[in-house]
Image (tube, rainbow, N blue to C red):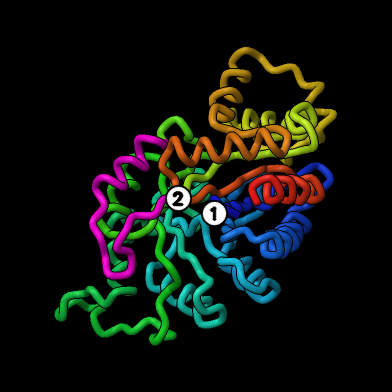
Amino acid sequence: MKLPLSVLDLSPVGENVAPSQAIRDSIALAKVADELGYARYWFAEHHNMASIATSAPEVLIAYAAAVTKRINLGAGGIMIPNHAPLHVIEMFRTLAALAPGRIDLGLGRAPGTDPITSAALRREQVEVNSLLAELLAFERGGFPTNHPFAKIEPMPSDVPAGTLWMLGSTLAGASIAAQLGIPYAFAGHFAMKHAHEAIAHYKSNYEPSPKHPEPYAILAVTAVCADSDDEAQRMAAPLRLAIVKNRTGRRAPIVSIEEALAYQMTPEEQAIADEFFEGAIIGSPKATADKLEALAKDASADELMLSSLLPDLAARERSLRHIAGAMA
């Protein structure tokens, strides 16, 4: 592929796709992406969401690494507020030891869930930037000599915790990524209207680092591709309704195409769906390819990461195959 393309997977749960099946489907799709030449395959972290099953991305990464050959596997991302920094580094060093050169550690500053579930995940609430600083100190050996953690050596000690990425949907994440001199991934699949500004800010303020002398930005985008524009819009109908339900507190498995098409949205619900889909790319192979290339150019993105919250594995696979073929 001329433009590097990757996949962001949330293991979508449907009325006829149980959460456990959604997990298995994600592994199957990772194998397809590997065969098609996609650059990387990331698993999200969300909790207590009936339509999303990716609650343990590190486990999915380990399994996917064992059944794929060359594609990078990663977390998009590990939500820093939910985890002990030392444990994150040790998990990803272990993954990097098992799949050398293929592991990405994407770091998110949001919890990826509601406040009550966040409290259940981590009883002691610590300021997220303090957790990030601690995580980086464990990875880079950055504790002062008199710090109580200075003599802790995360194991395995002879490998890095994969490639560090900062995730974000605002200028805050872009600023942190630029300051740290690490790659940046922007969540355009739900916040596209801020993408151009955030990526421009990241690149213009980038501070080169030994591992990453140049900035590198991924832009995530909702993308659904089918044989025709009409069929792609039809396939995306359940996703539109799922977004509305999630944003209005009615979380549930994603409904069928027929049920989604029959649902009559209120003006308020339509506005929610339209805002989310503002940057979505939905269409035939050629139309999708043209729009993806234009998006990457306009946003100065070095790579695009495709997200499609479709529970139907066959539909998601066809979409990836269509796009790979059109972008070859």
266 in relation to 208, above or below: above
The span picked out in magenta is 195-217
Residue at 55% from the left image edge and 27% from the top image edge: 278
* 148 or 120: nearer the viewer: 148
Residue 127 seen in the current view: no
Disc 2 residue type? Asp
Name the residue: 33% across, 64% down.
212
Q: Quadrant of residue 265?
A: top right
Residue 250 % position (x, y): 65, 32
Residue kind at label 1, given as amino acid type? Pro
Residue 262 seen by the camera: yes
Q: Tag 1: Cα neighbours inside 10 Å, few (<14), some, or many (≥20)?
A: some
Under tag 1, what secondary structure? Answer: loop
Which label belongs to residue 44?
Answer: none
The percent position of residue 285, horizontal first and vertical second, equals: 71, 39
Disc 2 target residue: 302
Residue 214 in magenta?
Answer: yes
The residue singled out by tag 1 in the image is 4
Left or right, 235 with respect to 199, comes to right
9 is higher (above) or lower (below) than 103? above
Kindly check if marks 2 and 1 are in contact, taking CB atoms under 8 A apart as contact. Answer: yes
- Image quadrant in which the N terminus is located: bottom right
* Residue toward you, 156 or 36: 36
Q: Secondary structure at mark 2?
A: loop
At 33% from the left and 46% from the top, the residue drawn is: 174
Instruction: Name the one closer to the observer, 91 or 320.
Output: 320
In primary-sequence order, the first of circles 2 and 1 is 1
**Residue at position x 57%, y 39% in the image:** 292
